[in-house]
Image: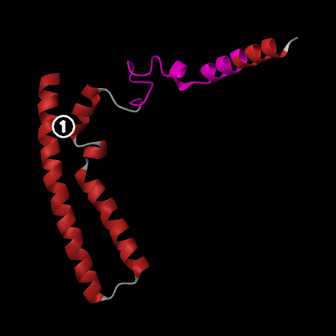
Amino acid sequence: MSKHKSSILTAGLLASALFAASPALMAADSFGNYGEGPRGNQRDMTEMCDNMRDGKGPFNREERRAQMAERHEAMAERLKLNDEQREIWNEIREERRQQHDKRMEQMQKKMKKRCDKWK
C-alpha cells in the first residue's frame, strides 16, 4: 500500500472516530423531552404548582429556614466567634435573609402567574 493511500485511509478512520465520539450525535433528541437532556430533572409543571400551593418540597419555608439556621450556627461555631462578632454575624445574616425574602416574593408572584395560566 502506498503512503498516499494509507494517509487517506487513516484520515478517514480518524474523522469517523471523532464524529462517532462527538456529543452532537448524543444530543440530537435531548431538548424535547423532560426525562432527558440538560433539563432532565425538571418536574412536571402541574406537580410543581401543586407543591407550591401545598408548601411542600422546596416551597416549605419553615423547613428550609430551620436548615439554614443550623448551618449558620455550625459555621459560627467553627469560626469560634465571640459575642460582639456573633452580633455582627447575625446582622449580616438578617440583611441577607431580607434580601432573599424580597427575591422570593418576586419569584412567588411569577410562579403564581405561571400556575394560573397552567390550570
Describe residue 115's horizontal placement relative to residue 81 as left or right: left
Disc 1 secondary structure class: helix
| Residue at image location 23% in from the left, 80% down from the top | 88
Q: Which residues are magenta?
A: 12-40
Is residue 76 magenta-colored?
A: no
| Residue at image location 20% in from the left, 56% down from the top | 100
List x then y, in percent, for residue 42: 35, 31
Q: Work out whether residue 16 or residue 92 is closer to the camera in this orientation and state it.
A: 16
The part of the image, by quadrant, that contains residue 101 is bottom left
Q: How is the image coloured?
A: secondary structure
The part of the image, by quadrant, that contains residue 4 is top right
Q: Which quarter of the rendered picture does the C terminus lie within? A: top left
Describe residue 103's horizontal placement relative to residue 57 as left or right: left
Is residue 39 magenta-colored?
A: yes
Q: Is residue 49 above or below residue 24?
A: below
Q: Which residue is denoted by mark 1 in the rendering?
A: 53
| Residue 15 seen in the current view | yes
| Residue 119 seen in the current view | no
